[in-house]
Image (spheres, rainbow, N blue to C red):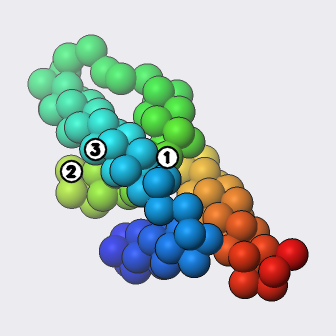
Amino acid sequence: MTLLVITLFLALVMVTGELIALPAYLAVSLITLLAFGLDKRRALTQGWRLPERLLHILALMGGWPGALVGIRQFRHKTQKKAFLWVLFAIVAVHYLVWGTLAWQRISGA
């Protein structure tokens, strides 16, 4: 499911022609993925945790693909429904923005 969501997003970006956004999404996603891995490790070792707010900010900045991969890869934050709702809302906002841009490109508006 994660791969499908990311692939559809890439298709939206490609339709808009704004391919310059892809390296930025990749960089922030990598940072977000590393943050999820670090937070999971600290959760297992009872160490200092990263605030959920930071993870959401990273996702909002374009790291949501990394967040989705991190949730799946590290099995982290899977039981925290409130966290997941906010993350899915962030993904929806990104889809809405890029979908609007793609629609404008296709319709010539």
In front: label 2 or label 1? 1
Q: CA distance from mark 2 to mark 1?
A: 20 Å
In front: label 2 or label 3? 3
Q: Quadrant of residue 103?
A: bottom right
Dot 1 crowding, Cα within 10 Å, few <14, some 14–19, many 20+: many
Circle 2 — which element? Answer: helix
> Could you tell me which residue is drawn at 70 percent across and 60 percent down?
97
Q: Nearer the viewer, residue 9 or 37?
A: 9
Dot 2 crowding, Cα within 10 Å, few <14, some 14–19, many 20+: some
As drawn, the label of residue 62 is 1
> Could you tell me which residue is drawn at 60 percent across and 51 percent down?
90
Rendered view: 108 above or below 21: below
Rendered view: 9 above or below 66: below
Q: Can residue 31 be seen from the camera position used here?
A: yes
The N terminus is located in which quarter? bottom left
What's under tag 2, amino acid-wise? Phe
Which residue carries the number 2 mark? 74
Q: Nearer the viewer, residue 78 or 99?
A: 99
> Could you tell me which residue is drawn at 50 percent across and 73 percent down?
14
What's under tag 1, amino acid-wise? Gly
Q: Nearer the viewer, residue 25 or 88?
A: 25
As drawn, the label of residue 40 is none
Q: Quadrant of residue 41?
A: top left
Rendered view: 72 above or below 25: below
